[in-house]
Amino acid sequence: MEKTDYQLIAQNNSAPVKMWTHGVPVDEKARDQLLNTAKMPFIFRHLAVMPDVHVGKGSTIGSVIPTRGAIIPAAVGVDIGCGMIAVRTSLNAADLPDNLTGIRSAIEQAVPHGRTSTRSKRDKGAWENPPASVDAHWAALAPGFKRITDKYPQLLKTNNHQHLGTLGTGNHFIEVCLDEAQRVWVMLHSGSRGVGNAIGSLFITLAQQDMQQHIANLPDRQLAYFAEGSRHFDDYMEAVGWAQEFARLNREVMMQHVLSALSRAIPKPFATHQEAVNCHHNYVQREQHFGEAVLVTRKGAVSAQRGQMGIIPGSMGAKSFIVRGLGNEESFCSCSHGAGRVMSRTEAKKRFTVSDHIRATAHVECRKDSEVIDEIPMAYKDIDAVMSAQSSLVEIVHTLHQVVCVKG
């Protein structure tokens, strides 16, 4: 029997599931969630599952869902357009100060991050007065936002303009890294922020309302979908496309501000080279596969067409990779978007202490408090095992080790 680089799960009356998970743990709940998605009648050929796979809300993180004639809003999720951007600088390790606290502080001052949830306070994760660079990028987004909000005015009262160029919370981060040649890189991870969350939430609700009579027949109510040609399908594709553009510009604005902060914190002038694309890993787009035009939803997965550059970050105490796609058609030309969690945030907070976190991130200038224990490196899969499992999907171009990490 021919040996494949993936594991195949087949069940009656559903699409096959191909999993690039050799040597990495796969939670049983994630497997069940994948099998539910595979039952949907509009899945094209098979689901492709990346080695960082783990349970998600609505759909499994680390899955590639090709569809014909329908789209599942909860599969894209609410962090629409979340992704990565990386820039290599002309600096090297010797150009960095011995104490990196000043660099972390400069980045934290340049980019709003985190969130203030109490209504009486100003939200520290949003701009109070957006700078000119944010206003200029918002001007490009504003006409599309008006078209969407003319139809869905409830989206006007969202964090939109004031969230452009901001980081957010959770696993979103800004890092300064060193590659194998000790060159300095800047890398960051974020998406479409408050407005993307509102768009995702709205259309997930609309899909469930549209399918109210049939929702009991679905394997999971989160798999409610819009049929192509319906009003909400077209409106969703317009809104999700806009949110993905917001996310791309959000990363660009942040990168500009981080590089400016770095130039203030380091006296030596430097140049930059954007070697890795500004790539989404929670998104949907039309693509050609196996000779057919299909919608491809990547939920925690990155496009890895032949020769295409991408970014696969590890946890905040591990390492990250700049990769080049190998164009593996069986994976719908995709790869993982990171290491993937092995436990929930709640479980990580129960299991680990601040002392554990301090030990695990001893080599990184970062927050060492109880609020970030859910991001402790041990809550994630072994990134080397994840990379080994997808050696037929991407090749490693650069290996990065972080020395500074900013989280919300």
Image: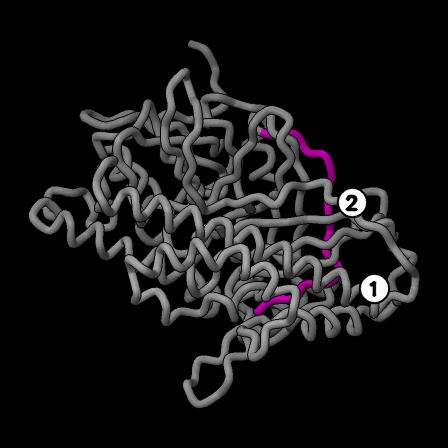
CA–CA distance in space, label 2 to label 1: 15 Å
At label 1, counting other C-alpha atoms closer than 10 Å, the crowd grade (few under 14, some 14-19, many 20 or more) is some
- Which residue is located at x 78 percent, y 69 percent? 103
Query: Which quadrant is the N terminus positioned in?
Result: top left
- Which residue is located at x 73 percent, y 67 percent? 365
Residue type, numbered disc 2 = His
Rendered view: 323 above or below 372: above
Determine which residue is flagged by label 2.
273
Residue stretch in magenta: 394-408
Place residue 368 in its image quadrant: bottom right
Residue 173's disc number: none
Residue type, numbered disc 1 = Ser
Q: Which of pointers 2 and 1 lies earlier in the amino acid sequence?
A: 1
- Which residue is located at x 56 percent, y 79 percent? 128
Q: Position of residue 394 (x, y in %)?
A: 61, 30
Q: Position of residue 355 (x, y in %)?
A: 62, 73
Residue 263's disc number: 1
Q: Position of residue 325 (x, y in %)?
A: 60, 29
Q: Which type of secondary structure does the marked residue at label 2 adopt?
A: strand
- Which residue is located at x 42 percent, y 63 percent? 195
Q: Main secondary structure of the magenta part?
A: strand
Place residue 176 in its image quadrant: bottom right
